[in-house]
Amino acid sequence: MTEHDTDLTVGYLRALERTGLTPGTINARRSAARALHRALRWAGVLQADPFGDTPRVADPTDPWSRRDAYTREDIAAPMAVADPDEQLMLLLGAHGALRMSEMLSLTWDRVELDRRRMTVTGKGRKTARAHLSGPVHAALTDVPEDSRTGYVLPWRSPKSIRMLLRALCTLAGVTYERRQVHGLRHAAATMLLEQTGDIYIVSRHLRHSTVGTTQVYAKMRPERLTEALDDWE
């Protein structure tokens, strides 16, 4: 494609939709095509940017429905069958609200047990302070002092964490699909919202720039709405 023709690119995305691909997959292919054309323009092969004006495919699914959160019971079950390192991983996700990359990169020199906080490197290589919940603080404190060097967790690859959590969920009889590792972060948001009722506290803990993003993570139980309406005067 050497000429700028948005009708063709839109038609290409619509054809992908008809094959049953998810909006996320289609948009990933759109991004890849834009990157290819950007490289071709840099090399002087063409000047067109056909995907520049091609809109992303909208996802009709409500943002808060795309990934489920683990419940308190779902977290307690694998905790009961996990060893100390595995328990710490679960707590860093489900209480510390750490992303998988943040878990893997966390080192002991960034953990301040006396101040009950840790410094994490998140999206865009940005650093931020995250506060320790009581269970996270206790799990970190239980690690022998002579072992508090280097990385906090022993696993070094995302695949290892995924396989570990899947195995723990299977052993504990907890559903892993539609949750995966990032579902632990959703669980942190949901449980903290249930405990505090304050979406702003949850947003601060998850280190989100907007509360709107936090609303995607924090799932409200249907019973909470029923209870609130029953008590409405």
Image (tube, rainbow, N blue to C red):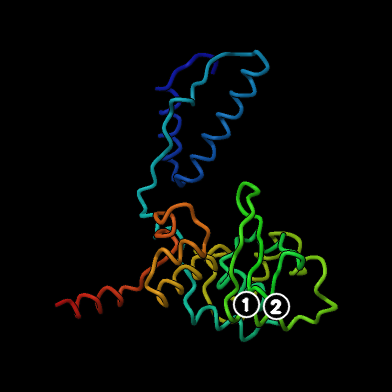
| Residue at image coords 41%, 39% | 57
Q: Amino acid at mark 1?
A: Val
How far across and how far down the image is residue 203, in percent?
46, 61
Task: Give the residue furthest to the front.
Answer: 115
Between residue 160 and residue 204, name the one nearer to us.
204
Q: Amino acid at mark 2?
A: Leu
Between residue 233 and residue 100, name the one nearer to us.
233
Q: Quadrant of residue 88?
A: bottom right
Task: Give the residue furthest to the right.
Answer: 146
> Where the C terminus falls, by quadrant?
bottom left
| Residue at image coords 59%, 65% | 130
Q: Residues within 10 Å of mark 2 (few under 14, many from 20)?
A: many
Q: Residues within 10 Å of mark 1 (few under 14, many from 20)?
A: many
How far across and how far down the image is residue 91, in percent?
61, 75
Q: Quadrant of residue 163?
A: bottom right
Left or right relative to 169: residue 84 = right
User: Under tag 1, what secondary structure?
Assistant: helix
> Would you say the residues marked 2 and 1 are in contact, meaning their CB atoms lie under 8 Å apart?
yes
> Is residue 108 shown above or below 147?
above
How far across and how far down the image is residue 7, in percent?
40, 22
Between residue 57 and residue 124, name the one nearer to us.
124
> Is residue 13 shown above or below 41?
below
Q: Could you say which disc has been placed on residue 136 in the image?
A: 1
Question: Mark 2 and mark 1: span between their CA atoms?
Answer: 6 Å
Q: Which residue is mark 2?
A: 140
How far across and how far down the image is residue 146, in percent?
85, 78
